[in-house]
Image (tube, grey):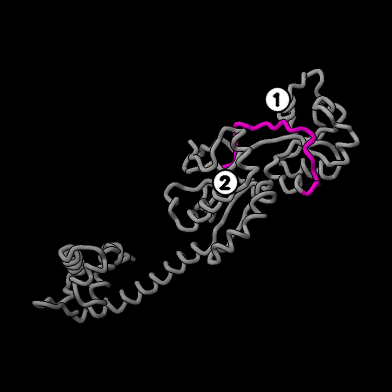
Amino acid sequence: MVDVLSRIPVDALRVFETAARLLSFTRAAEALGMSQAAVSWRIRDLEQRLDRPLFVRGVRQVSLTPEGERLATAAIEAMTLLRRAVADVVEADQGVLAITTLQTLATQWLATRLGSFQLENPDLAVRVDTSPTLSMLGADGLDVALRFGSGQWPGLESRFLMPAVFTPMCTPAMRDRLNLQVPADLKRAHLVGEPNEWAAWFAAAAVAPADAAPPPRLTADNQAMEVAAALGDQGVALGSPILYAREIERGLLVRPFAQTVALAEGYWVCYPPARRLTPKIARFRDWLLDTAQSDPAVVEGARLAGREVGEIGG
């Protein structure tokens, strides 16, 4: 069976519904942001496609024919339902902000600050996803991504959030037990972390390879697990003084040496360029960058890395 709607442009039905509801081509044109001539042309085209008149045109007003009244009743009801459904979808989307981020960044930095964002934006519910899957945003219901890398991802706009910096961390008891006085003393430690990052740190601390510690005996796929080992008094881990600022401030962790190394990559906030002005995304992005700029540890790390919070990637 042939669908009779297949030969009728949906836009023509929308114009007809507005004109039928207002009983005025002029008012319909104003409501639709069109010229009166365009409204008149669309309706005449619809009448020709249906092969029957829908309006009786007077000198200063129009009225519906019996066929027009029958079509208008259905069109107005259908458009009302469609407007309500679209409004529900838009309002639901605008009421939830879905963020995808890395686990360590989420637990060590974002989660402790999100409360202030929600206080400032009580109309928004926040959902945080820490799945390792790299989302392209939008199709899977996610709005914003906090990513680690160079700041260049196809199809996304990125703004620099914070640098990736690392320095040795351990418990005060571990520091005292190993009597860590100079970087070379770490040769007595059980190191935790990536071998290449430890090699970079020893080089920055001017420790000759012969004086450096043996390769780490424990590595993990995220920083949180590695620093957790240090918190458990299991060794000395490389960690971010930005992400673990609270633990350092509370004395749970100490930095036995001041030397800090910055990676070329960093953490970025990303979103589709076409959605940069979407209110919930713009509000979160601006709040996030302001929050980072007010964090002394982030500012110091950015200075060390030669970056600026908020700079555009690419």
SS state under label 1? helix
Instruction: Report the disc number at residue 293.
Output: 2
Q: Residue at x 78, y 49 (%)?
A: 250
| The quadrant where residue 227 appears | top right
First in sequence: mark 2 vs mark 1: 1
Asked if residue 140 shows in the view, the reply is no
Instruction: Report the disc number at residue 204.
Output: 1
Residue 171 shown left or right of residue 132 in the figure = right
Q: Residues within 10 Å of mark 1 (few under 14, many from 20)?
A: few
Q: Residue at x 19, y 79 (%)?
A: 64
Is residue 305 highlighted in magenta?
Answer: no
Check disc 2 and give the amino acid type.
Gln
Residue 207 shown left or right of residue 268 in the figure = right
Magenta residues span 250-268
| The quadrant where residue 115 appears | bottom right
Q: Position of residue 93 (x, y in %)?
A: 49, 62
Classify 21 as above or below 299.
below
Q: Residue at x 87, y 38 (%)?
A: 174
Classify 30 as above or below 228.
below
Q: Residues within 10 Å of mark 2 (few under 14, many from 20)?
A: some
Judge depth for marks 2 and 1 and give the one in front.
2
Is residue 267 highlighted in magenta?
Answer: yes
**CB of mark 2 within 8 Å of CB of mark 1?**
no
Q: In front here: 66 or 266?
A: 266
Q: In front here: 207 or 194?
A: 207
Check disc 1 and give the amino acid type.
Ala
| The quadrant where residue 183 appears | top right
SS state under label 2? helix
